[in-house]
Amino acid sequence: MDAATPATQAPDPAILHTESKKTRRLIIASYWIVILLAIPLWWSTTSIERQSLPTANVLAQQERELVFPVRVHLDTSRYGGVENTILVQEVQRQLDSNRDLSEAQEMRVQILSEPSNGDTYQVSLSRGAREPAVQGRQLSLDVQTDDQSSPTVLAMQLADTIVTLLAPYTAARGSQTERVVKYAPRYRLAFTLLNEDSASGNAALTWDIRASLSKHIAPLLERLSVLHNFTVESQVQYHAPLAFDPQIVYSQDRTEYGLTQEDLTVFVNSAEWTLSSSVSNDPVLHFVLFIPSQQHSPLHILDERGHSIASTAFVLPQWGGIVILNRPSPIVSRHLAASVLDAAFVTFRYQLKALLGVPALPSHVHLADASFDGAGITDWQLDALLRRRAVENVVGTQETLQSIVRLVDQIEGMPVGLDVKSDVLGALNALEKVYAAASASSARAAQSAGAAFSLASRAFFNPGMLALLYFPPEHKYAVYAPLFASSAAPLLAAILREVLAWRRARKARNRGEHQADTTGRQKVE
Amino acid sequence: MASSLLASWLRLYPTVQVFATWTGITCAQVNSQDIPARQFFERHGGSTSGHTNNWAVLVCASRYWFNYRHMANALGMYRTVKRLGIPDSNIILMLADDVACNPRNKVPGCVYADQARSLDLYGDNIEVDYRGYEVTVENFLRVLTGRMDPSVPRSKRLLTDDRSNIFVYMTGHGGNEFLKFQDNEEISAFDIADAFEQMWQKKRYNEIFFMIDTCQANTMYSKFYSPNILATGSSDIHENSYSHENDYDIGVAVIDKFTHYILQFMEGINKTSQASMQDLFNIYDYKKFDSNAGVRSDLFGRPLTHALVTDFFGGVAQAEVLKSSLPEVRAEADFESWDTSPSSATHTDDYIVPLVLPDITDTGNSSTEPVPDNNESLFPEPHLMDLFVSARAAPGSLRGAMAGTARSWASTLIVLALVAWVCAKR
């Protein structure tokens, strides 16, 4: 093209030969089109996914309370000293005004004179002098025949026993709340035979753990399986030094060793003992049968005044239980037979029950002789535990869901994915099931409550819910300004210049047309 | 990001940066003015912590050889909490861990915190849970909030509940309201405060003791707003935290002053010690640290004199003894006389051989000078960011805030003027 143009018409060197208004405007427009098209993309890729949560529903849960209807059938057929309906009314009146029950707020007790179907507790009165005994959901209560007490006194006595059985968790037993482990659907029980020093002579190298477990622990686990799932592991360790020296106590003509209260708190030498495998994330309850070495035998627990006490077992709240086994000095066997372990495992079972929050029977109530099933938990106790765990988990679920809603509202950079939303909905759904099941079966209610709590926790701990890091606005400007300000200036300038040039050109054209018009008119004249 | 950026643009002009003032003041006034408040909080049983288990999260946020002392800080704390009874399973140690086996280390496999090299902190039983490049802000926040992938093993998790006392220790290079993680990213005071709030909401702690040793450390706890947190830091806003001493053979500073004196105090503590947190804070001294170490206790519900050091550094708090003798097999439902006996009496037996850290200051070591080592604040003066950022360094006065706003407007005007000028040319 250059060659074709004659040399006399050389182009202006200030103007590129390719430059034309149209090309320039196309170039500028293409820049802006790219930017405008990119904005939605940028917006969608950098904004965080925040699903809307059922906030109103979650907040409405706060108002709801879980109440278990409890029906107790009062059977006076074998007593006969008093009109049944009067006694029933009187007991009902006593229960309604009972403080412990109204504080617990988790059940509505109804006394019936006729047996009804479903999970009804039965209280049978009879004449006699035996101590009250429970079996299953039955309580047999003896009233002495010569006792000509009024129905009111009898009713008070009855109401009192019923309340201690139905609501064993009262504020008075504060230490219990610290001891009991948090609810978890699964627990790992780690039994350890721990020799302080197996070389010292009185060590036990093997133990009949299978027999002891199946005899003492398995029935209990079976009984509690509605609530928890247990994994059991056991091990024998041959060397487990104490981190301190026990005190020497001289009693009669022999030397003993003692553990003070402070020693007990630091008894577990966590730096050197490996008491459980860490293969799962389930909470672990430790049970340690500790055999002191010959240098520290016999080892006892001391009271405040430095005298050794008969018990050699203690519980570390939420951690587990420890039993110290002092072996007789001429060692008969290196093997601990099941019969030797009986005492220790009964203690372990007791400790396990305490750690899991199984209530103890009131001191004056006994287990009916024929009814010991190896677990030692009556339905009264199990139901109380189920009700308590259900209420605990319902409250925990409500709180967790509320805190999710509150945190999502409070922390702007927190993503909320679909899985979080479905877990929250699932938890709410499970809560509905709890309320529905409460009247029919406390076991099903407790299971649903456990599921609700697991779902709510899973929603809270969802790995995707990690909030974006906070950066002060200044940081953002510091990052964005050098990039955007410098690139925005020429883009804006170019478009402004084009607009100005276009307006100028239009004005010029207008003027040109105007002039043409006027000249044309002159010609006509 | 887009929406938050837009929102922050909109917020730019009314943003008044007054928050810098009170951060420095709170800690200075704590000791004198909150006595009535403390007495108010003194309730029945206020002296017991109510915890049943202890956890520790120890973070060394630095890496590379010249940050040797930060590794030593974290390992010193690790050794102390372990000695005082927190099991390894309850300690989350985050450590770049690149000094012990560094080719430049003259004593391979060892980390020392003093010139005399009296104690190898690396020892033979160190369990580092997050190592090297795993030490990230994200992982730290995941540890705190518990938001983990299901496949993460138990040892990397903080499995706490509402009966847990947690000791959180952080060290590294920091600045005003941030702490740098491995020269790569940073965590701000807001992030930690939000993480603690989430923990509180999910009942993941009973009490937290937050300790941080970095430059301008006190700013890091200034944003906390959740209850039951006790916090302490090594230096005030605009102050550096200094290293304690150099080892001329190793060739770098081996420990920071603040941590050094804390550890020195801790050597006098055993598992059953009755020393209180107030006793710990009483050792704070500008002459020793060359900085104003701060304490924030307004969120903490107990008087400091009643809060034991072992509430946060120790192991188990109480044991219940079965009072009766071992029961017969069948009569097992009968015993229920349990006794809660929290440890109370002072027990002076030393069953731990105390570590002897020689008191270096007594030997007249010249390294107590504010040595110009790597421990100064992050950005060289003039602060690069000040070019873009409004006057956050101005200590929060109204004038400073107005100047900041004015500067923001001015810079916008400059950009617009530039545009106009380019247009108008020709």
Image (tube, rainbow, N blue to C red):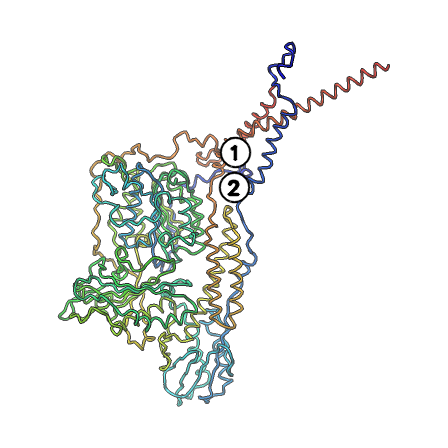
Image: A32 above or below B19: above
Q: Quadrant of the C terminus of chain B?
A: top right
Tell which of B340 and A124 is nearer to you.
Answer: A124
In this rendering, would B92 be left or right of A113? left
Label 2 belongs to which residue?
B1
**Residue A364, percent across and down?**
36, 78
Tell which of A175 and A232 is nearer to you.
Answer: A232
In this rendering, would B321 be left or right of A90? left
Q: Quadrant of residue A233?
A: bottom left
In this rendering, would A25 be left or right of A512? left
Q: Is mark 2 on a helix, strand or loop?
A: loop
Image: B203 above or below B32: below
Q: Is residue A489 visible?
A: yes
Distance of mark 1 from mark 2, alpha carbons?
Answer: 23 Å
Label 1 belongs to which residue?
B405
Residue drawn at 56 percent across, 52 percent down: A52
Q: Which chain contains the residue that carries disc 2?
A: B
**Residue A246, percent across and down?**
20, 61
**Residue A264, percent across and down?**
26, 62
Q: Can residue B410 be seen in this view?
A: no
Q: As drawn, which residue projects farthest toward the left?
A: A253
Crowd tier of the residue under label 2, counting other residues whose Cα lies within 10 Å: few below 14, some 14–19, many 20 or above:
some
Q: Which chain contains the residue that carries disc 1?
A: B
**Residue B408, percent across and down?**
52, 32
Tell which of B218 and A124 is nearer to you.
Answer: A124
